[in-house]
Every structure is written in structure tokens, then in C-alpha cells.
Amino acid sequence: MAAMSFRRIMSILLVLVLIAAACGDDDGGSDDTAGAGASTQASTTTTGTASTTTEATDTTTTTAPTTTTAAPTTTTAAPALPELGSVGLGPYGVGVQTITITDGTRNRPLTVDVWFPLADDSAGDLVQYTFVTGDFFESARALAVDVSSASTDGPFPLVVYSHGSGGIRYIHSDYTETIASHGYVVVAPDHTGNTSVERVLGTADDAELIAYNRPLDVITVIDAMVDPANAEAGPYAALVDPESIAVTGHSFGGYTTYAVASGTTGNPNGDTPADDRIDALIPLAPAVTGLLPDDTLALIDQPTLIIVGADDKTTPVDPHVEDAWEASNAVGHYRVELIAGEHQSFTDLCDYVEVLPGREGATEIVVETITLMAQEGCSDGDMPIERVKELTNTFAVTFLESVFGDGEMITADTNTLPDDIVFAAK
């Protein structure tokens, strides 16, 4: 009996050892209930368990690669974009001469100013931009010399400037001089019948005739400036690259800028052709709505830079700029709105009101006209005129260089843009 008891005891112990061995890998311990619970959990939450296991594995095995890939991201991050600078004056001195260009077909003589890059050793007196009354504004930089003083570095691109309604050819001389200083020939006609002279005298042409004549004036000027045989402008033809031509203009000159590129129809005086020699457009505060329909604007595909004052009340952004922006098919289309800029910000009127009213012998009607017009651009709260000049010249010259040179146009991808403009590109 003792032997039997011993064998039974040994059998029981053996069973216990086998049970213990079978349960030894279960983290739940040797408790059968705990072991059964663990088995049930693995079965009902396989995804969760697998996920937990994967997370633990990922944490261990991917931490190093994640850290490794983060380092290049930090070290190769794109540098901050440069702040927008100022183009300032270009490398050339500037000469300016007044000539006459005549359209024989219309029997229409045009008084024209030509700004051009000067040779290094040029000398002369500063030009005085003189009104018919004898009042004048003296340039800070341009010399009154003829084509014999021009630089021989050309040929240079040609830029035609069209003044606003009731303006005059040199009304934005800071702009035209600055462009010329960067290696351009800039030419601006008086649009006879729509200048400051007719404005003061009350002898201006009617609006339809003005709209008809203006784009033809620009075509006439281009024809003359690229023709060595032209009796009046021929000497300048050697300076001009006939394959590189831009048009720019303010207000009604903005209309002219678009119209000479698109052509016009429906004017009772006749249609005007599109000039396919034009490679780029810079309308400044353009007058568009009611003058050029959408289907006409849609014909424009040249690179175009629009610059306008956000507070312009004469040709407000909406609708004038909005209409042109939406309808034109310009390839390379840019738009700059100057915060607190006004309509006359794109003229020299702010400089005129600083000089002319205090000058002894100034003509009263000239002073009164300038002072009145200058309110829209030279008043308290308007963008300071020196800032307007800096932004306008910088965007315009950079745009021209992107079209005719090897420059890159200013965009939000190239520069950190200032907070006193609204910029768009498409």
C-alpha cells in the first residue's frame, strides 16, 4: 500500500510538472483562467494586437530612419526669399531730344521726346521740360543732347510711352528716364488733340476721334523709329532693335497700350490695326471699361504687366483692371496694386507741385491745374510718391528685362514681397 501510494504520488507530480511546462510561456502565469483569457483576447482583437505589436516594432526599428531623414530636411530647407530691392538708376546716363514725326496719311505731325542711353563721356545741360506757357520742370539727370551723344552699345529695345488724357509726352519723366538708363530707347508722342494744351484751352478732340488717333500715333512712331530712311527719326534707327518693342501708357494711355496690340473696331472714324511687332505691354492705371470690349482684349497674348493704385478713383481697379485682367489672354500676366496709390501717382505732378507754385512768374492757370490734378496722388494718406516711383520703376524694368534680356520677373516665388502692394500672376 505504501508502494502504491508512492506511485500515485509520483504520477500526480508528473502530471503537475507537465501542466506547468505547458503553461510556462504564457505571460498570464499558470492560472488556467488567466491563460484562457489571454487566448480569447488574441483571437477577438487580432488587428488591435497586431497593431500594438507593429507599433512597438515600428517605434524600435523606424526611429533611427525617421531621425535620419529629418536632418536633411532641416539642412536643405530652402533659404528665405530675398526682400524686394530697388532697381534704381541703370548704368547709362540719359539723353533726351525733342523731334517731330509726321503721319503723312493723316497729315498729323506729332511732337515726340526721345530718351536714350548716353556714351560715357557725354556732357550737356540738364533738360527743362517746358510747357507752352514757358513754365518748366528741370530734370535731375537727363541731358538735353542729340543722337550724336548716344551710346554705341546698342541696338536697344524700344519702349513707346503714351500719356493720359489731357497729359503731355514728358508727364512721367522719372519713369521714362529710369527705363532709358537701363539700356532702352524710350519715345513718347504728344497725342495731338488730347494734350494738356487742348485741356487748358478747351479745344480737345471728341472722345471717338481721340480713341481712333491714339493707337495710330503709336504705330506711326514705331514706323519712324525703326526706319533709317525716315527724315525725322532716321538717325535713331541705328539705336533701336526692331525685334524688341514694348508699349506702356497711363490712363487713356493704358487704353492706347492695349488698343495698339489688339486693334480696334467699331469706331465711326474707322478701325485700327493690331501691330504685331509689339512684344510686351505695361498699362499703368489703364482706362479699359467702355473702351475695349472683352472680345478685343481677348486678342492680346503678349506678356503684360499692369500697375495701378489700389485707391484709384478715376480708373478704379474694379472694373477697369478687373476687366482687362479677366479678358486678356496675355502669356506672362502680372498685376501690381499699390496700396494707397492714386490715379496721378503715375505722373510727375507731385514733383511739379513742389516746384512750380513757388516759382516767381509761374503761370496762374498752370499752377491751378497742376494743384487740382495732383490731389489724386499727392495728398495726405496717399502712398508717398518716392515709394510709388521705386515700386513702379522696379517692377517695370524687371518685367522688361524678363522679356528682352536674361532677367527673371519678380513674383512671390522669387522675392518676399512688401506689404504695401497686392501682387498677382497668371
Image (tube, rainbow, N blue to C red):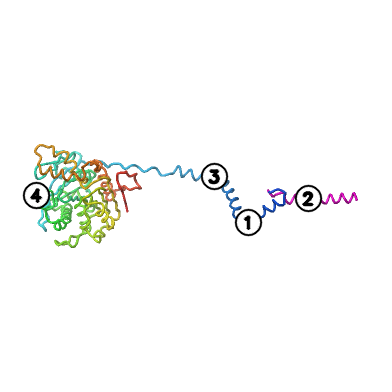
Can residue 91 be seen at all in this image of the molecule?
no
Residue closest to the eye, 172 or 279: 172
Question: What residue does disc 2 label?
Answer: 16
Nearer the camera: disc 1 or disc 2:
1
Task: Assign a secondary structure to mark 2.
Answer: helix
Please tell me whether residue 17 belongs to the stretch shown in magenta. yes
- Contact, mark 2 vs mark 4 (Cβ under 8 Å): no
Left or right of 165? Residue 9 is right
For the residue carrying disc 3, how many other residues have a C-alpha within 10 Å: few (<14), some (14-19), or many (20+)? few
Left or right of 348? Residue 40 is right
Nearer the camera: disc 1 or disc 3:
1
Residue type indicated by callout 4:
Leu
Task: Assign a secondary structure to mark 4.
Answer: helix
* Relative image position of residue 395 (x, y in whole percent): 27, 46
Lower position in the chain sequence, tag 2 or tag 4? 2
Question: What residue does disc 1 label?
Answer: 44
Left or right of 134? Residue 226 is right
Residue type indicated by callout 2:
Leu
For the residue carrying disc 4, how many other residues have a C-alpha within 10 Å: few (<14), some (14-19), or many (20+)? few
Question: What residue does disc 3 label?
Answer: 64
Can residue 66 be seen at all in this image of the molecule?
yes
Residue furthest toward the right? 1
* Relative image position of residue 374 (x, y in whole percent): 18, 44
Provide the residue span drawn in magenta.
1-27
Q: Distance between the residues labelled 1 and 3?
A: 33 Å
Nearer the camera: disc 3 or disc 2:
2
Among the 4 quarters of the image, the one containing residue 352: top left
Q: How far apart are marks 1 and 2 (CA)?
A: 30 Å
Question: What residue does disc 4 label?
Answer: 201
Lower position in the chain sequence, tag 1 or tag 3? 1
For the residue carrying disc 1, how many other residues have a C-alpha within 10 Å: few (<14), some (14-19), or many (20+)? few
